[in-house]
Amino acid sequence: MSILEALENWQGIVGSENIVTEQSQLLDVETATFLTQQKIHAILCPANCSQVQACLKIANQFRIPLYPISSGKNWGYGSSVPVSDGCVLLDLARLDRIVDFNEELAYVTVEPGVTQRQLYQFLQERSSNLWMDATGSSPDTSLIGNIVERGFGHTPYGDRFANVCGLEVVLPTGECIHTGFGRFPNAQTTPIYRWGVGAYLDGLFSQSNLGIVTKMTIWLMPAPEYFQAFYFSIEQDNQLAEVINALRPLRLNGTIKSAVHVANSYKVLSSIRQYPWTEAEGMTPLSPELMNYFAKTWDFGAWNGSGGLYGTKRQVAEASRLIKQALKGKVRKLQFLNDGKLVLAQKIAKQYKQLTGLNLPEMLKLIKPVYGLMKGIPTNTQLKSTYWRKKDAPPEQMNPDRDKCGLIWCAPVAPLEGKEALALAQMTTKITLEHNFEPLISMTLLTERCLGCVIAIAFDREIPGEDERALNCYYDLSKQLNQSGYYPYRLGIQSMDMLAGAEDSYQDLLTKLKNAVDPNNILAPGRYSKVVIHK
């Protein structure tokens, strides 16, 4: 049986106009932000759950693996590229309906093609009093695509997979199931009670190849009476531990309800501008002296943090007082920003620069989008940092894959303790600089007890040899982090084999589950799983 026979069958399901076999278009989806070699036979674009089911049944008949994507903008982790060679992409972008919405109970039910931009506009058009959670990626990224990867955002609902329920899932055989109470007829609590009754299955379909999520309910946050952001910076790298320890009790006791993001000076600079090739005279990595020069110009520190405060005015005022108390003497500066102050800062920005010499207008270009993210407003500005090492300015329509931006994410997690944060930072800085890359590090007080660290290895794929050097840096960094007990919360397609080092009994159970639900190894082979050997 051949791919041509399978394509004929798929045409009967989705229509020939919704199948892509043109080589130039296939080359686009075979391209990521790092070196890949996987080839893709075709792209299928189903319109609904029934067509997804039918596509999977044909894939089983012809033994041709399918690799689902939502928007394909999984930059830094593999973009649209499958883990294994010889797959057909199942592009779910046409499944773009907002199926259900409830203002009173604060939830929305969406399909995988629904983007951050689409949901934000949906809420705005209805003058809703609800906020979504947003990530710093493009507004045109899929909500479900990020959530099933257990991505995180900026609001009190930033632990995104912890705030969803009621999944509709197509299994690799083409069967369809509904999780929680969704499996019962006329169930009234499917979108509001995560657990249902009996075994809880939702987690099986995040970071796995056990099924395709075609519908998901996402819980939304009621807009608070008052919102205020806080920003701080610290002068020296070794002060990071003290600040993390000072913030942890406030996260634990609920004073700070949302994620707090802390970025080093290199990361902040990459968010403001591209690599200073002229000032660095073409040399890499960026020297500490130049880094300090730019930090002074824009008035940021060795580490720089931001977080949001939500509640009544009295609640926010008390939270502000406690933060001031906790950080007193530990930070270089601490500032609070609300809507009124942001407007005022924009009005006086030019005069401020003239009086002080500090580049407030440029800093506002960074602060304003981050401020918006804490209110659930998606932004494209963070995407510019993927062009860090490029020598041409980012185009208006940014596409890191097309523009040969080099980006590999490494995302270890650690206990929320200062000594762990400092160890991560020191290890990452040493290894990345040894490989001639800047240590572009951000850390997030992700939950009350856990610290998420996201490290960007940024480079220019058009420079010969950079692909190989970047991957070597990633593997070296990952190896040393893992040996120290800092494992990643999320993997790229180039590192799925890292799971081979996990507990054998755990892997054996996953293999049994995979064999049971996908006997032909049709769905996303190799994704978050070892190679399946059928007996």
Image (spheres, grey):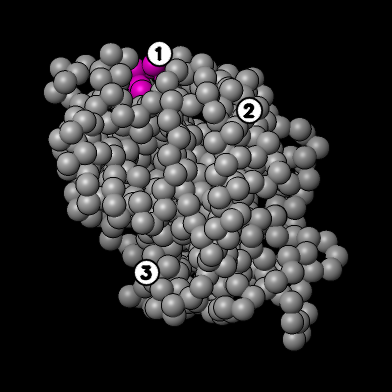
Tell me the element at label 2: helix
**What residue did someone put label 3 on?**
19
- Label drawn at residue 245: 2
* Residue 181 point in image, percent of width and height: 76, 74
Please name the amino acid that badge 3 sits on: Ile
Query: In front: 217, or 47?
Result: 217
Q: Report x, y in % for residue 209.
A: 61, 53
Q: Which secondary structure lies at badge 1? A: helix
Of the image marks 3 and 1, the number of the one nearer the N terminus: 3
In the rendered view, does 258 fall on the left or right side of 162? left
Q: Quadrant of residue 56?
A: bottom right
Nearest the camera: 246 or 423? 246
Q: Residues within 10 Å of mark 3 (few under 14, many from 20)?
A: some
Residue wearing tag 1: 434
Q: Which numbered mark, 3 or 1, is in the foreground of this view? A: 1
| Magenta range | 432-439
CA–CA distance in space, label 3 to label 2: 53 Å
Residue ID at (65%, 40%): 250
Cα–Cα gap, marks 1 and 2: 29 Å
Q: Is residue 418 magenta?
A: no
